[in-house]
Image (cartoon, helix red, strand yellow):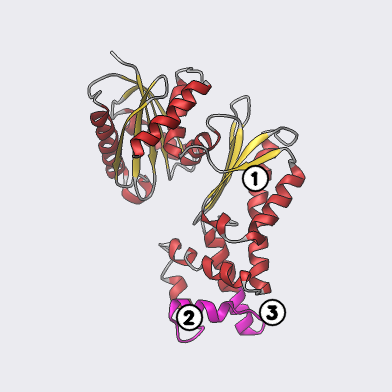
Amino acid sequence: MGRYVVGVDGGGTKTLALISDLEGRILGAGTAGPSNYHIVGIDNAKSAIRKAVSQALSRAGVKGEKIFAVCYGLAGLDSPKDIAIMKPHLEGLGFAEKTLVVHDSHIALMGATAGEPGVIVIAGTGSVAAGVNESGQYVRSGGWGPVIGDEGSAYYIAREGIVAALKYYDGRGPKTLLLEGIMRELQLETPEDIIGFVYTCVIDFSKIASIAPIVSRLASEGDLVAQDILRNAGKELADLAIAVIKRLDLKDRSFPLALVGGAFKAGHYLLDEFKSRVLSFAPRAKLSKPRFPPAIGALLLALKELKVELTDTLIGNLERTYAEILS
């Protein structure tokens, strides 16, 4: 009987499961709907995960074989309480002897660094940084959500753009084209109409985040207020990274620092500020793109749970067979 591991990347929009052998050869993949239990509920999250994993097993042709370890990296597991709630339900699915349940930033980190010590900063609609050191210690910074956190994210950039626009309108802030740009983009007649837009988006912060490209465009066209917003976003994201680097004692070490998410494409004002601050603190950090996606990070964690050595050959097998699965 073969020996296999499963990695699951469960998010707010979809769930992806991968199965591999202990040499890192990916044999199958399965997809399903969202599995963030805060959004879809526990039963629907379990159903999506069951469907994705079952599909991966079927496509791999190993249905019924024993899975030795499974790692579930799920969005919404933001506290130990969340993990305590979901773990018994996931163990109850009965897919493996060993079940590992982690926050999705953990599998994103493992995928980004191919299992090596390092740091990842994720800046999409929200923001979070995470890292792991040579001792295997994992820490996270940020990820507190749009009401009390998400500094440096697309949501943050958009919100600051709206605030600056309204301050200019009130006469409390410097001149900026942000007000005109936001009103044109949202097809609003008066600045007061922004109130209705914002407060109908409180359950879908991605709609507010969609304004971020306006800030980026105006910054590139010379709007000083928009440029400052992007610089501040870069500072906030650097603070997330530096907090993780400090806690893991990586300041004087060489390590990969992977950048993920659309906010890093907002323009050089953000990226230059981020790089300057982080590299002034940790000059040996190596900024990079993620090597693998989060689902492979989940596979790597499952393999590590079985004490499998992550050799160059194993990493090469993952790289080759993932490309084959995608094709």
Q: Are marks 2 and 3 in contact (CB under 8 Å)?
A: no
Residue 250 lies in the magenta-colored region: no
Q: Amino acid at mark 1?
A: Ala
Q: Which residue shows up at 42% across the image and 67% down it?
A: 201
State the extent of the magenta-drawn residues as a range.
164-192
Q: Amino acid at mark 3?
A: Pro
Distance from disc 3 to disc 1, alpha carbons, whole Å, reads 31 Å
Asked where in the image residue 55 lies, by quadrant, the reply is top left
Distance from disc 2 to disc 3, alpha carbons, whole Å, reads 20 Å
Residue at numbered disc 3:
174
Image height of 139 relative to 143, above or below = above
Would you say 272 lies left or right of 323 here? right
Residue 175 lies in the magenta-colored region: yes
Residue at numbered disc 1:
241
Q: Which residue shows up at 33% across the image and 28% down it?
A: 91
In the image, residue 154 lies at what x, y percent?
53, 60
In the image, residue 92 lies at what x, y percent?
29, 29
Residue 184 has which mark?
A: 2
In front of the other: 147 or 124: 124
Q: Residues within 10 Å of mark 1 (few under 14, many from 20)?
A: many
Helix, strand or loop at mark 3: loop
Q: Quadrant of the C terminus?
A: top left
Asked where in the image residue 129 lies, by quadrant, the reply is top right
